[in-house]
Amino acid sequence: MTTRTLRRPGGDDSSPAPAAPVVTGIGVAAPNGLGTEMWWNAVLSGTSGIRPLTRFDAAQYPAKVAGEVRGYDPAAHIPGRLLPQTDHMTRLSLTAAEEALEDAGVDPAELPDYGGGVITAGSAGGFEFGQRELEALWSKGGQYVSAYQSFAWFYAVNTGQISIRHGLRGPSGVLVTEQAGGLDALAQARRQIRRGVRVAVTGGVDSSLCPWGWTAHLAGGELSTREDPAQAFLPFSADANGHVVGEGGALLVLEDATAARDRGADVYGALAGYAATFDPPPGSPDAPRLRAAVELALDDAGVDAADVDVVFADAAGRRTADREESAALAEVFGPYGVPVTAPKTMTGRLAAGGSSLDVAAALLALRDQVIPPTVNVGEPATDCPVDLVTEVRRPARLRTALVLARGRGGFNSAIVLRTAA
C-alpha cells in the first residue's frame, strides 16, 4: 500500500495523520430486515424488500412500489412514554441507535462528560412530520409553521431524542445533503472525534412514505413507475427507468481508535478517508465532480486506486446519472477495473439513510470477505463499463472498500473504509 503523510487539521505537512476512528457498533432498520444480522442475511441471499406500497393507498399515483420496513412494532422497541412524542422515522432511528450502542458494548454512563455525541443526517423524513403538523393545523386551527421550519425542528428533535435517551451530551448535529448525508454525517463525527470526543452515534435513517412525501418524490421526475418490483430499480442497466424510494438506514458507533483498543472492543473497520465535492450548476459545460470526490477521498486515506477492493456505488438508476458514475469509476480504476455493487437494489434509495446503510454493508463485507449482490440487473449496459457484482456472495479478499453517494442538488461524497488489522 502506498502511504502518505496527511495534513493534520491546523498543522503543517510534517504533522502525522491522526489515527482513523473505528466503527464498533452497527444498528440497522431496512426494508429487507430489521436488525443488522437479519438484514445482512437477506442481503447475502439476494432477498429484496421492494414491494407494493402498504403505508397508504397508492392506487391513484403513477409509482406504486417502495421499500418499506415491514413488521415493525414500535412498542416492542420504544418506551411507551416516547411513543406519543415520536413519529415513524424517529422510532426507527431510536431502534437503530439502541442496537448500535449495544453492539458496540458502549455504556454512555461510563463516558466522560461530553465524551459522546450524536451526529446524523436527514433529508426526506420531515415530509411525514410536516404532513402530520398540517393535518393538525387544518383540524385544530394550530399555529402555522413553514415547511422548512418544521423540517429543521423535526431533524433536531430526532437527533435530540437519541441524545437524551442515552445521555450523550457531547457535540450533536444534523446534516442535510440528501443521499450523501449518511457519509457526510460520518465525516462530521470523525472531525469531532479528532477534537477529543470519544464516541459518536452517527449515520442516517430516513422515511417519507406518506402522500405528501410521495407527491414530492414524483415531482422530482426521477421515480420509476414500473409496478413489477423486480423491474422497477435497475441501476447501470440499459433498461434503467428511475429509482425506487425506500425507508430506513443505519446508525453506527464511531469511536476513537485508541479508546476502542483500550477497552477491548470488537472493530468492524476504520474510517480511513473522506471527501465531498459539489457539481457545477445545470447547463454548465463543466463535468460532474464525483471523480474528484473519489480521488480526494483516496488521497485522504493514503491509498491508491489499486488498493481498493470493492466499490459500493451510488447507483441512481437513471441512464445519464449511471453513465456519469460509470465514467468516473472507469477514469479512476480503468474500465471494469474494480468490483462494483449496489445492494440498495434490495431496499430502494433511502435518502439520508441510504449511504450509511451502504457503509454498514461495506463493513460487513470486509468482516466476512464477501461482496453482496446487485439484484435484478443482469448485465450492465455497454456504456456502463463496470464490473457489476450480480451473483450472490462473490468471495473476495477485501481490505479496502469505497462507498459513494450523490445527493439531489449536486452533492458528491466518498468514504474509504479499511479493515482494522
Image: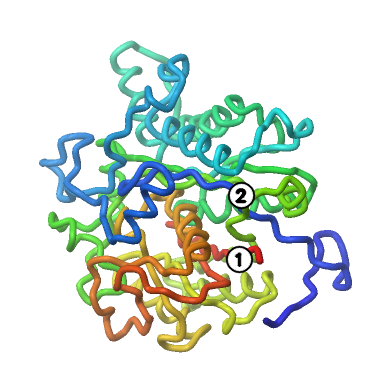
- Asked whether residue 222 is in view, the answer is no
- Few, some or many residues within 10 Å of mark 1 (<14, 14–19, 20+): some
Q: How many marks?
A: 2
Instruction: Please state the horizontal and vertical placement of residue 275, each as a whole percent of the image.
Output: 62, 65
Report whether 305 appears left or right of 406. right
User: Do the CB atoms of the residues marked 2 and 1 lie less than 8 Å apart?
Assistant: no
Q: Amino acid at mark 2?
A: Thr
- Using the numbered discs, state the Cα–Cα distance from disc 2 to disc 1 in whole angstroms: 12 Å
Residue situated in front as seen by the camera: 138 or 84:
84
Image quarter in which the C terminus is found: bottom right
- Few, some or many residues within 10 Å of mark 2 (<14, 14–19, 20+): many
Image quarter in which the N terminus is found: bottom right
Report whether 93 appears left or right of 133. right
The residue lying at 61 percent from left, 28 percent from top is: 166
Query: Which SS class for mark 2?
Result: strand
The residue lying at 75 percent from left, 43 percent from top is: 197
Q: How is the image coloured?
A: rainbow
Which label belongs to residue 92?
Answer: none
Sequence-wise first label, 2 or 1:
2
The residue lying at 62 percent from left, 40 percent from top is: 105
Q: Amino acid at mark 1?
A: Thr
Mark 2 = which residue?
24
1 to 135, vertically: above or below: below
Mark 1 = which residue?
419
